[in-house]
Image (cartoon, rainbow, N blue to C red):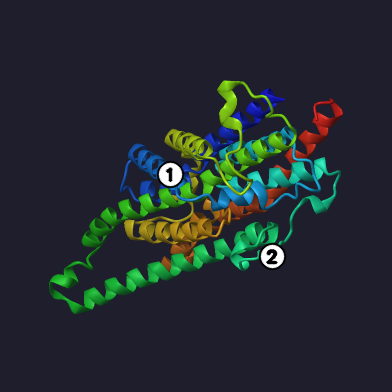
Amino acid sequence: MLTLVLVVILAALVFEFINGFHDTANSIATVVATKVLSPGKAVMLAAFMNLLGAFWGTAVAKTIASGLIDTEVVNVTSQVILCALLGGITWNLITWWFGLPSSSSHALIGGLCGAALAAADNNFAALIWSKLGAEGWTSNKGLLWKVVIPMVSSPIAGFTLGVLILGILYGSIKLLSKLGGALGRLARPRWVNAIFGKLQLVSAGYMGFAHGTNDAQKTMGIIALTIFAAESAGTLDNLPSWAAFLHPGGDQNEIDTWIVVTCAVVMAAGTAMGGWRIIKTLGHKMVKLHPIDGFAAETASATILVGAAHFGMPVSTTHSISTAIMGVGFGKNPRKLKFTVIERILWAWVLTIPAAGGVAYGLLKLFEALGWA
């Protein structure tokens, strides 16, 4: 039914909007905490760079659309995708309310897996665990390659890269101090804060761009999956002229231009709304940051996100920036890290996929009981 397809697309865009304000903190928490930019200016920078990043490739979108769920085992209907989205939205709103920087990416993936399992009557073959690609490991599909391995490796990489970048920067400052003279004056705290205050504008923009390259594509993949499923079911036959844009422009490995543009704009709008509860947690509660620290954390996190997007891995922006901030804090002084806050964040990470999946699973079973699916 065309109306249901449109409802699912609308729900996907609602998820994208919430993703924007939920994950705004990932892009701007550090630049706000270091007082380099006011919250308002930081949000506008993040929104603009999110918009640019969203147009930078579709590899992650293709993973969501065709790399996680085996459509030959489970019938991916509009109801299945709607429940997946509702699972992700519910968990996002819960964690936003409590100020926990959980992963929107994993909430969406958890919802998709939970709904697929419910539709397949608990047949785990509905989930693609691992599928080797013909073009080498970079084209491999499945939860193992695209979700589990990145979920473990990206936080480790974020922490490690944060420590390394900060170590290099601090080492360079010490070297300048020993050289003395005009170069030595650059190592004074006043000059270091001034220089990295400017450089952090670049790293914050880089972080916003990286966020757009990865997160915006996830909803693109969900909308593409919805449309191809509707096409297969014959729902898009004899469309009215105003809805002709819904016809897929290619195969399931291609994402139509209108999907890319719509998701980019909606995510940028959501980002512009801000996400102050999570900004407070990331920017102020874990460790006190200075401009040099913010530059190191943003550069480390953004580099990981851009690399993951290139390989079609839906990596969590939240995980990468949170662990990069932890790495920077550890590099400064391990005793300054606030482990009670970190523990709350870790629990949110552990619970995200099963919680969102459980909500989606329960909703689809309820829809089936009511005769809606």
Q: Which residue does the image show at 58% across and 56% down from the upper left?
A: 313
Amino acid at dot 1: Asn
Residue furthest to the front in view is: 238
Q: Which residue does the image show at 46% across and 45% down from the upper left?
A: 54
The residue beneath circle 2 is 132
The N terminus lies in quadrant: top right
Q: Quadrant of residue 248?
A: top right
Q: Is residue 177 above or below residue 226?
A: below
Categorize mark 2 by other alpha carbons within 10 Å: few (<14), some (14-19), many (20+): few
First in residue order: circle 1 vs circle 2: 1
CA distance for labels 1 and 2: 32 Å
Name the one closer to the observer, 137 or 363.
Answer: 137
Q: Which residue does the image show at 19% across and 78% down from the upper left?
A: 179
Q: Quadrant of residue 238?
A: top right
Residue 29 appears in the figure: no
Query: Is label 2 in a helix, a strand or a loop?
Result: loop
Residue 151 appears in the figure: yes
- Rendered image: mark on residue 361: none
Categorize mark 1 by other alpha carbons within 10 Å: few (<14), some (14-19), many (20+): many
